[in-house]
Amino acid sequence: MQYRPSRFGAERAWPSRRAWAVGVGAVLAASAAQAQVSPIDEARRQSQIIERQQQERLREAQERALPPPAAPQGADLKDMQPQIGLPDVGPGCHNITELRIEGAQLLGTATRAALGRDVAGRCLAASDIQALLALLTKDYIDRGYITTRVYLPAQDLGSGVLTLQVVEGTIERYRVEQDGRDAGSLSVRSAFPGRPGEPLNLRDLEQGLEQINNLRSNTARLDLEPGSQPGQSVVVVRNHAERPVHLQLTYDNLGSPSTGRDNVAATMSFDSLLGLNELIMLTRNQTVPDHGAHKANGTALRVALPWGYNTFSLDASESNYTNGLALPSGAPVEATGRTTSYGLGLSRVVLRNQASRVSLTGRLATSDSRNYLSGQLLTVSSRKLATLNLGVNGFTQLAGGAFSGGLGYVRGLGALGALRDLPGTPDDYPHAQFDKFTLDLGYQRRLQAGPLPLQWTSQFSGQYSRQTLYGSQQFLIGSPATVRGSLLNALSGDHGMLLRNDIAWPWRAKAGDSNSVSGVVYVGWDIGRVNNHAGGDRLGSMTGATLGVAGQWKRFNFEVFASRAVHLPAFLTHEGTLYGVRLSYSM
């Protein structure tokens, strides 16, 4: 269903889900502090708001067209116990002075030395040797080498030398068995880190399976079959493939009066059309009706290409708006604008096990905004910025729930044609070259309130910057994606924090003989706060509450909710209760 309270699921290669709270357009505080706002200041302020809304809408439209990221579901290797057979070594025990381990290319030097010290000088019985074989085999299994086996070859133990033979399991080949599509549409080379002839590691196979199943059209599983030689295995990928092209249509009434409350979007995705397990997504959104003095539209492209533990990404977007304003004299003027963004990203999984995953991410991006008032360029709100984003993201099971987190560093660059700060730029003036740090945490778990099964979701997002920032890099609160209950009111600052909490109750109802409608009823409470290096009076905190219901019937999803701001700074006006509707249909 479309209700997704948590934005902190498994990480993606393109801009992460935490981007809804940081790195989008915001309101400039300086102009709003004036007692009387000039048309230029008002156009600048609204252009910042509209830029934020358009970028947020494009991102949300694409993320809602994707299946929820899957949590790591690897095998628990601690429960895998090796079955060890032992040839007859005779009665009694054998004095061992030296341990030799042959064929163990993957055995660490420290482990090898520790085993040697433990064995040397001991008199080993058959049970001791069997335990040693099991210990060494379990060491391989715990590191993911589940097809590696350790044997006791024929030898004279009377010599005092104990020799163990390790047959390290390898991949002989991959075989794809796929129904629904040509097997060539699934690439084992781009999905799996391990190559034929290399050691077989279960974590490598789980990574490849996850890369394959990241595409909505795939439902794959793995089997291992004996190879033609001892220690070799054939990795069989059995996949049920559906059609590779998907379309999602959405409608909502969460837009701004500046560009229209009603919005529609269409997202088309293409799964592995090039046979590389790549995902290509194209999104178009616009307000309806798309005419008159208040309108906006946007187009976005995302491409993700997996390669083993790496995922490469490319994204591009363009958004446009028209907003009619009035001079103090009553004469109408027209504010227009366009924002063009590009990004290249790389994500690499550096650790994974049955319940956890840690990734390092990097992204190089540019954003070029041009805003006009009656055809004249507003230089104060028109600029090109370039950023380098570095981060670490993680997911693990914790205390009966799922915990996710991300720590990021963003550096404003003076390259790629971006705006460069002048020498001696005052501290209270926005900087194009900056350093900021972000932190995102999420936790989700099931609860039981008497007979009622519930799900609790908590999300935290924060940002700290060492410099004064332009609006597009500030931390923003006040929207359906941040502090709910506000469409017009927004606060932004160089520093900020946001905490969202939701409690959801799942429900199901019959709809005909064989169909049912399922969904959740949820309540939410949000709190956010922002601050600035330069100070100002448009700072402070906001809280909001929401009550909603979401559901799914066949390919149709719906969400209806009521939100209300509970606390606002004194200089903002309460908007009353906001009623939101979001509808989508997937095909």
Image (cartoon, rainbow, N blue to C red):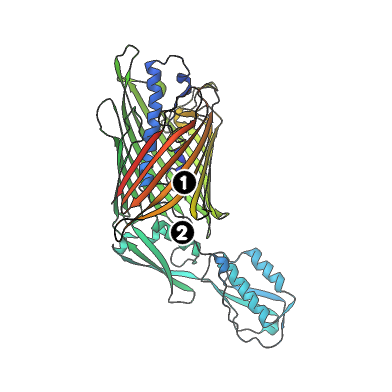
Q: Residue at x 28, y 25 (%)?
A: 293
The image quadrant of residue 417 is top left
- In this orientation, which residue lies closer to the viewer: 547 or 320? 547
Marks 2 and 1, the one that precedes in the sequence: 1
Q: Secondary structure at mark 2?
A: helix
Q: Position of residue 50 (x, y in %)?
A: 37, 29
Reply above or below: 403 against 428: below
Q: Position of residue 440 (x, y in %)?
A: 52, 42
Residue on which the image places disc 1:
6
Q: Residue at x 33, y 46 (%)?
A: 281
- Closer mark to the observer between disc 2 and disc 1: 1
Q: Secondary structure at mark 1?
A: loop
The answer to whether any part of residue 105 appears in the image is no
How far apart marks 2 and 1 lie (CA) works out to: 23 Å
Q: Amino acid at mark 2?
A: Gln
Tell me the tag on residue 207. 2
- In this orientation, which residue lies closer to the viewer: 458 or 551? 551
Q: Residue at x 42, y 45 (%)?
A: 14
- Residue most extreme to the top: 329
In this image, 330 relative to 88: left or right?
A: left
Reply above or below: 226 against 569: below
Q: Amino acid at mark 1?
A: Ser
